[in-house]
Image (cartoon, grey):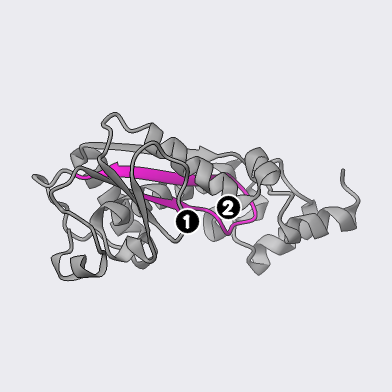
């Protein structure tokens, strides 16, 4: 636990068996949204935990192995492109978070979720804005979700190399939009997202 920051999270008890939860992949135009839940072991502290977006890829990969080796329990889950298009991205994210918590092999006493919304859970939970910078358990969850999502993008890049998924990770960069306009949408694109829907409408793709 980041002791100098603990005061910013009312009610957090470092001695309580708690899980941190975070997501990766809400903003991209393609692919599933990932979520992770992590129960850290206070007897095996992990140095360097931070918001995954503030870490280098190499550091995230290193911490990923540390977290998966030392955590009491962790689970990485997702909501599919089909679920995102059917439910909307917010509800799909909540579903992925719910699946991550339910997939833990140890039930936490409390769950701390990054952001300002909570998924429907069977255990007490609190939302923490910027929690990935305040609580180690949420930082750890953000790292697992981000690494898992990035690895997915690298795999899909091999299937669709002209789109550049390994580079932009599915975000709507100029490189991505150019490929989308030239070649249309892949089965992994989120058709409910406006930039994708506009390209499909223009190309009159069903």
Could you tell whether 31 is left or right of 42 in the image?
right
Residue furthest out toward the top: 105
Q: Is residue 59 above or below residue 141?
A: below
Q: Give the residue number, with chain letter if any, for mark 1.
A: 117
Q: Is residue 188 visible?
A: no
Q: Secondary structure at mark 1?
A: loop
Q: Camera-side residue: 202 or 78?
A: 78
Number of the label disc, if any, that sits on residue 199:
none
Residue at 21% of width from left, 40% of height from top? 71
Q: Give the residue number, with chain letter if any, for mark 2.
A: 90
Mark 2 → mark 1, Cα distance in angstroms: 9 Å
Q: Secondary structure at mark 2?
A: helix
Across and down, in percent, residue 204 comes to 91, 51
Residue at 26% of width from left, 52% of height from top? 137
Across and down, in percent, residue 21 comes to 37, 49
- Residue 59 inside the magenta-drawn segment: no
Could you tell whether 160 is left or right of 4 in the image?
right
Q: Quadrant of the N terminus?
A: bottom left
Q: Camera-side residue: 9 or 189?
A: 9
Residue range corresponding to the magenta coloring: 21-40
Across and down, in percent, residue 107 comes to 28, 33
Q: Quadrant of the C terminus?
A: top right
Q: In the figure, residue 67 lies in which quadrant?
A: top left
Q: Earlier in the sequence, mark 2 or mark 1?
A: 2
- Residue 27 inside the magenta-drawn segment: yes
Residue at 61% of width from left, 51% of height from top? 89
């Amino acid at each position: 636990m980041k002791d100098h920051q603990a005061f910013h999270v009312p009610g957090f008890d470092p001695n309580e068996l708690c899980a941190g939860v975070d997501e990766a992949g809400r903003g991209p135009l393609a692919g599933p949204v990932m979520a992770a839940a992590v129960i850290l072991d206070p007897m095996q502290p992990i140095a360097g935990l931070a918001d995954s977006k503030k870490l280098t890829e190499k550091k995230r990969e290193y911490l990923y192995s540390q977290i998966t080796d030392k955590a009491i329990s962790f689970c990485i889950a997702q909501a599919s492109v089909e679920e995102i298009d059917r439910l909307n991205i917010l509800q799909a994210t909540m579903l992925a978070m719910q699946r991550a918590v339910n997939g833990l092999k140890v039930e936490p006493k409390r769950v701390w979720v990054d952001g300002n919304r909570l998924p429907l859970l069977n255990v007490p939970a609190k939302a923490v804005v910027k929690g990935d910078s305040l609580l180690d358990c949420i930082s750890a969850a953000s790292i697992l979700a981000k690494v898992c999502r990035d690895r997915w993008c690298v795999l899909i890049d091999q299937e669709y190399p002209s789109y550049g998924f390994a580079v932009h990770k599915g975000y709507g960069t100029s490189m991505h939009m150019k490929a989308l306009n030239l070649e249309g949408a892949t089965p992994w694109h989120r058709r409910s997202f406006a930039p994708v829907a506009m390209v499909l409408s223009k190309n009159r793709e069903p």
